Amino acid sequence: MLSIFDTIKDIAFKIEYAIQTEDLGYSSSENSSGEEQLKLDVKSDLIIEKAFSKTLSVKSIVSEEKEGILNLHKNGKYTVCYDPLDGSSLVDVNLSVGSIFGIYEGELKGENLVASAYIVYGPRVELVYVEKGIRPQLYGGNNQSFKRLGEICLNKKGNINASGGTQKNWEKDHKEFIDSLFKEGYRLRYSGGMVPDLHQILLKGGGLFSYPATSDRPNGKLRQLFEVIPFAFIYEQAGGEAINDKGKRLLELVPSHLHDTTPCFFGSKYEIDRLREAYGVTK
Ligand code: AFP
């Protein structure tokens, strides 16, 4: 596992350099979700593929940017599912973006996640890494190395409300719930980048990030294996909760297909309990 973490630290500085230097235009290709790929998406994906091709403990990798599974080392133990540059459409307006990694052992499903990590490319490069039994560990990057800054622990209740999706496509109950938090004094903090938006809630002590089912995306937008399950692990290990619109723990999801999405909610306990009440689901 250590070699995977060291590989992710190496990837961070290579993608940071690519963000600073690469052309921000579109490539001529699409990803497996039919979305146009930026040259940066393709470059970041290549950096990660090359890095894990040298990490013998990695049996295979699955990228949000590619259709299938890429087998690397037959004696490897882990499958790494990753989003190479989440929020990449924000780079051209100079907002923070990130890379997300889920490390699985065995079948690709929530309960087989053994570690997860994400990198934030912002004013500074930061990395969060978590394994079973520990709080998420925060590292700050500088001069091609990372220094541990501490661990992350969510308060029981926060005051940030990161409400995703197009509001005109929200279901009535969801809109009433989100509005009720704002009436309680929650502050809207939403950039459209999952990694910085979830990172902010983790570091500011709590709140709620929501990407619900919407009329245009009835199964939500965020991908289970590459985005949702890795962050669910981090939020639960930080003392928070992460559920779907049926009240199911996101770490209990079993995707039918590699690129399945899900409605998802991540937050402190108070906000997730309020969401359960609004959605009429029990713990
Ligand atoms: P892009 O990678 O296309 O920029 O999408 C980013 C993202 O997948 C995720 O990072 C955000 O949380 C979410 O989309 C924002 O979606 P909305 O703009 O629909 O709220």
Image: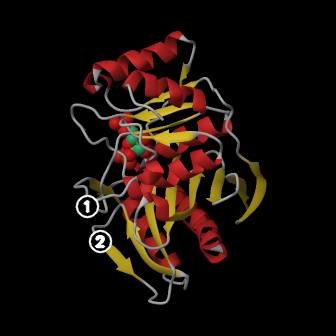
Report the image quarter containing ligand 1: top left
Q: Tell me where residue 228 appears, x and y as whole percent.
A: 44, 50
Name the residue beneath numbered marker 1: 32
Mark 2 highlights which residue? 68
Examine the rendering and report whether any part of residue 86 can be seen. Answer: no
Q: Nearer the viewer, residue 2 or 244?
A: 244
Given residues 27 and 187, the one toward you in this image is 187
**Mark 1: which secondary structure?**
loop
Mark 1, Cα crowd under 10 Å, few <14 / some 14-19 / many 20+, is some
Among numbered discs 2 and 1, the one appearing first in the sequence: 1
Residue 128 placement (x, y as % from top left): 64, 54
Amino acid at dot 2: Gly
94 or 213, which is in the foreground? 213
Q: What amino acid type should be assigned to the residue bearing mark 1?
A: Ser
Q: Quadrant of the N terminus?
A: bottom right
Q: How many marks?
A: 2
From the viewer's perspective, is the residue at label 2 or at label 1 nearer? 2
- Distance between the Cα atoms at labels 2 and 1? 9 Å
